[in-house]
Image (cartoon, rainbow, N blue to C red):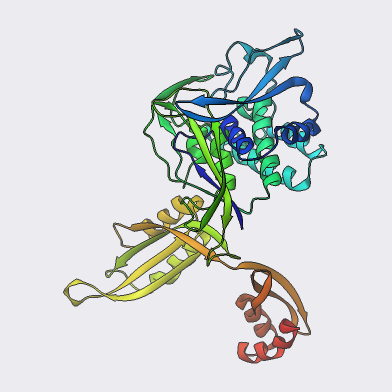
Amino acid sequence: MRALYYDCFSGISGDMNLGALLDVGVPFEHLEAELTKLGLSEHYRLTACKRIKLGIEGTKFDVKLVVTKHQHDCDHKHEHTHHTAQAHGPSSEHHEHRSFSDVKAIIENSSLAIAVKSRAIAIFHQLAVAEAKVHGKTEDEVHFHEVGAIDAIVDIVGAAICLEYLQVEAVYALPPEVGSGFVKCAHGLMPVPAPATAELLTGIPFTQRLKGEATTPTGATILRHLVKCYYRPEALIVEKIGYGLGTKDFEQPNVLRVYLGTVDSPGRGLERATQYLVETNIDDQNPEFFGDTEARLFAAGAVDVYRTPIYMKKGRLGVKLSILYPAESEQAVLDVVFRETTTIGLRRTTVDKLMLERKFVKIETPLGTISVKQAYYKGQLINQKPEYEDLQAIALTNGLTIKALYTKILPYVEA
């Protein structure tokens, strides 16, 4: 399985990402030619050159905006900072600040590959949702300094182009360095990470050792979309290493290191996801209440809830309540646990979940339509079973036991 591994020890921005992907093997000419399909090439010039940052050689990628109104090149370059009108300096007055809908239309109307379009739009949508949330507006109401800028379009669409060229199937990363302190932007002084960056990093581990902004909203949204697991895969066989250079100078090399290689492990052919597992021991709650609690937890976004009988101190019988959930459901899940149970504390661990590919199909039977869950391993169907809720509804309608109904519909499921 072809894989990328991001080592973001000095953070990540859109230009650093493209520099690293070019350095690892994507031809600059390919990236440049594909980006012209957006129909925006008259507004910018791309440059990529080898430079050295504190002893490390890598690729410095830049977008220079062409200000057609005054018929001269604006000396705008990427800044490893939060993209706002003020952060762009003197050229900011010339930026077109498009909405997410505008950017989406530009991408959809281009002749880029469908996979590239889908990935780029998904990355932009994440950024749009984050920006809208921190500014208290809807996606349609917000006009982004970040999303609307030409260089942000190049960064995100360019990332999708490079990933498609490299034919990467999985992306891993170490927790990114985000920086600390405050930075100037269009709204004044902002804390690091910037509000949109912080929103995009929800559920993602990160570090804050450096002074200044190390990870931008563009970098954060690229990571959030691409990376499912934040660890170094043990079975990674490295083919190439690329370095993308940032603009700022830190006390350490301001570079993004990317490894390109293959992963061949026992998990091959499986889907992977990083999720949270919280557990708590309860011995002072009416057991009848757990049924309602479980229903509320599933409604809050939990993917699994289970109870284990345990012996607790002083010989008391208790229950260990375990809840598995994705990062985005954490607050809703915790609200249910603390409001609906008697616990006063939880244990939380991060788990790497391995899953078979799953699909749901509708099967027509003489007794009605039933939804069937199918599981695939390396493209081969290895397990399938009808959904219990459908069996229950049809059994009640036809006056059958579920056991009798299952026997009747099984030939249709296995056909």
Residue 81 in view in this figure: no
Q: Position of residue 359 (x, y in %)?
A: 67, 68
User: Which of the pair 237/141 is nearer the observer?
Assistant: 237
Q: Quadrant of residue 33?
A: top right
Look at the picture and state if 308 lies above or below 77.
below
> Looking at this rendering, what residue extends furthest in the left direction?
314
Give the total number of marks visible in the rendering. Answer: 0
Look at the picture and state if 404 lies above or below 105.
below
Q: Position of residue 111 (x, y in %)?
A: 83, 39
Residue 154 in view in this figure: yes
Q: Quadrant of residue 412?
A: bottom right
User: Which of the pair 29/319 is nearer the observer?
Assistant: 29
Q: Looking at the image, which residue is at 62% across and 36% down?
A: 128
Q: Position of residue 96 (x, y in %)?
A: 70, 21
Quarter that holds the N terminus = bottom right
Q: Position of residue 241 (x, y in %)?
A: 55, 42
Q: Looking at the image, which residue is at 59% across and 46% down?
A: 225
Quarter that holds the C terminus = bottom right
The reply, left or right, for residue 236 in relation to residue 152 is left
Q: Looking at the image, which residue is at 62% across and 38% down?
A: 21
Look at the picture and state if 85 lies above or below 171.
above
The reply, left or right, for residue 226 in relation to residue 71 is left
